Amino acid sequence: MLCHEVLAKDDDIVATSHFIADRNDPLWQYSDAGFHRRCFLGWERREEFVGRFNDVMALHPFGNGKRHQMRSDGSITEAQS
């Protein structure tokens, strides 16, 4: 979505579930989307996107008390709430 090239089966990608509901939010179009990791790493809004993802996910822990957390490289891990 950042480079407008099709994601291929073997590409290293960054992807999220839907986490921004407001269609007027400038990052909305990137929520529930996939990116080539190389494009994501060079994206000027990467830090803002990662911060927003982590802020939203902090509010929604799973039943086991864990939540998703995104690292600066776009990888998603589970963290204890």
Image (spheres, rainbow, N blue to C red):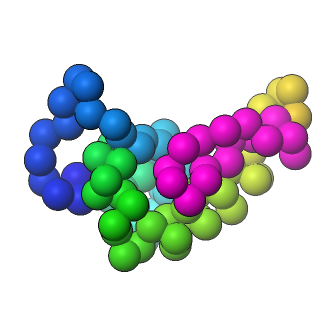
Along the viewing direction, whichever of 61 and 7 lies nearer the viewer: 7
Work out whether 3 lies above or below 32. Answer: below
Residue 41 shows up from this direction: yes
Residue 13: % across, % down = 35, 39
Along the viewing direction, whichever of 52 and 74 lies nearer the viewer: 74
The answer to which quarter of the image holds residue 28 is: bottom left
Residue 26 shows up from this direction: no
Q: Is residue 28 left or right of residue 55?
A: left
**Of all residues shown, which one is farthest toward the left?**
5
Would you say the magenta stretch is mainly helix, strand or loop?
A: strand
Q: Is residue 5 left or right of residue 2?
A: left
Residue 71: % across, % down = 61, 53
Which residue: 31% across, 53% down? 38
Work out whether 31 lies above or below 48. Answer: above
The answer to which quarter of the image holds residue 27 is: bottom left
What's the magenta region? Answer: 66-81
Along the viewing direction, whichever of 31 and 3 lies nearer the viewer: 3
Q: Is residue 70 magenta?
A: yes
Work out whether 75 lies above or below 46. Answer: above
The answer to which quarter of the image holds residue 10 is: top left
Which residue: 42% across, 52% down? 31
Q: Is residue 52 magenta?
A: no
- How many numbered discs, if any? 0
Residue 81: % across, % down = 87, 45
Q: Is residue 55 left or right of residue 45?
A: right
Which residue: 86% across, 41% down? 80
